[in-house]
Amino acid sequence: MVLRSPLPVRLPALPGVGFKPEHFDDILADRPFDGFFEVHAENYMGAGGPPHARLGRLRRNHALSLHGVGLSIGGADPLDREHLARLKALCDRYEPESFSEHLAWSTHAGAFLNDLLPLPYTAETLDRVVAHVAQTQDALGRRMLLENPATYVAFAESDIPETAFLAAVARRAGCGLLLDLDNVLVSATNHGTSPEAWLDAFPLADVGEIHLAGHAETTDDAGAPLLIDAHGAVVPDPVWALYRRVLRRAGPLPTLIEWDNDVPAWPALRAEAERARGLLVAAAHDEAA
Amino acid sequence: MSAAVQSRFAAALRDPAAALPPDLALSRGRVPERRFVVYRNNVAASLRAALETRFPASRRIVGEAFFAELAGAYARAHPPRSALMMAYGDGLADFAAAVPALASAAYVADVMRIEAARTRAYHAADAEPLGPERFAAMRPEELQRLRITLHPSLEIVRSAYPALTIWAMNAGERDLAPIVDWSPEDALVVRPALDVVVRRLPAGGAAFLGALAAGMTLGTAARLAAGNDAGFDLTLNLAGLIGAGLVVAMTAARPRRGGRAP
């Protein structure tokens, strides 16, 4: 077995929030936020204008995470080279502490479907994802993080557990992982498995960032609970419980509050981040003890 | 995933009437119909939402229900070709112009063109406009020979209808009122600093800016605009050009010699 050095975590082990333009003035007027901001890379692929003015201003005082939602790394199609070039230009412009993308696909036959779609976990898809991650890292000249998905369906042909699949991608492509704990809860609930067992099988040493978010709840065809990764609510208690479990095992890690829909006022969003900070401080204390 | 699995999944996503792809695992012994529909709804709703966000005034004019139908039809016929959702809907105006139900409201397509131009201007490259002082000391013959680089965000939307007034009334820029003067309007869309500005061009203004954009000197552009529209007022148009921050660079053309075209 090859001995690997630990993932160089470049985001600080602090809370972060997904930056929303409507919060810009309130963020600047508030007492300084000691944490990082994350933005969807695709929203900053214009040449100029207010988006870059705001992001450039925040970048002066904060670590930055670029989070891609459109690369389609899990897809059967070749990666869009123009999109890779746009990501490279954005990374060069802002030198973010982290770039991350999803274990999902969103483009088919040249059409962008604007959603994070699921893929079967097989030897074939593993090879392709490894190749796509490697190609991305080569194009960007940096190591990336790959995020575990929230899924609503599974494929009959899948024969690799999701945790083993992600571990293999990290090992073979040399990338880090973004651990979205709401996605863990959503997928486990939807597929009738245990989120704790999923976490126990997951390679925590490869994690470079954690996502915390809320979800919506409905029921499926059998009347069983179906959780939807909606990013439109507070982080629910079961996700905080998973977070504490991870911090106990892995120590403090950069932790993002992800809230993209029905976005609350800045103070409410910040309060969620401060709640994460409390747990991060406690985890650092436990680690030192 | 094999390309075939992805193809079947994508096909079932985009057609609400299609059967579920046969590749899905059963969920608690059942075909996961409602689970798959989450993806189908996500795709349709997110594309519709992108268009609703970009075309709020057009949506207000045609009504939410009609716009949702139009956006759905557009998304099925013209799915985005890249992950740059800020550019999605550049073709909506042309699509709407061919919709029979909108034939009696043909100005809607022009309102869409204004809204599309606004988003492009919002994301366009930044450039510092030249201040009026750069032109103040110039003699008329110097001005005549100038070639102008217009602001990279600048676009002109020419309408056979009062599309700018209609846009302004439905974008909250102006109070709703009956439009007494139902005449063509040329709209200038530009972002000299951080705010996108939309304003009406004076007579001949569109031809004047078009000629400048094509690389003609100020003098030639003015003659062309005057020929295009007898109401063209050079002083007014120059004041607009310079005062609105439309010029980001200029070079002096050499004096004309021997009757050569400038």
Image (spheres, coloured by chain):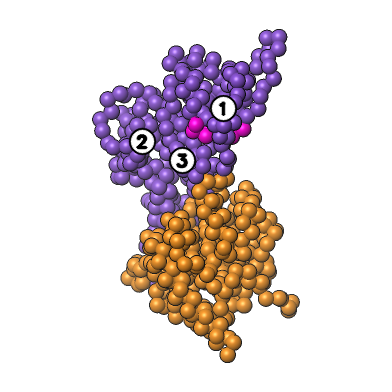
Q: Colour of chain B?
A: purple
Numbered mark located on residue B227 in the image? none
**Where is residue A163 drawn, in percent x and y?**
56, 74
Q: Residues within 10 Å of mark 3 (few under 14, many from 20)?
A: many
Q: Which residue is mark 1?
A: B136
> What is the three-letter code of the residue carrying label 3?
Val
Q: Which residue is mark 2?
A: B167
Q: Earlier in the sequence, mark 2 or mark 1?
A: 1
Report which quarter residue B3 is drawn in: bottom right
> What is the three-letter code of the residue carrying label 1?
Ala
Please, is residue A238 above or below residue B158 in the view?
below
Please, is residue B71 above or below residue A114 in the view?
above
Check disc 1 and report its element: helix, strand or loop: helix
Separation of marks 1 and 3 at Cα, in angstroms: 26 Å
> What is the three-letter code of the residue carrying label 2?
Trp
Check disc 3 and report its element: helix, strand or loop: loop
Taking the spot 66% from the left edge, 64% from the top edge, the residue there is A143
Closest to the camera, between mark 2 and mark 1, is 1
Closest to the camera, between mark 3 and mark 2, is 3
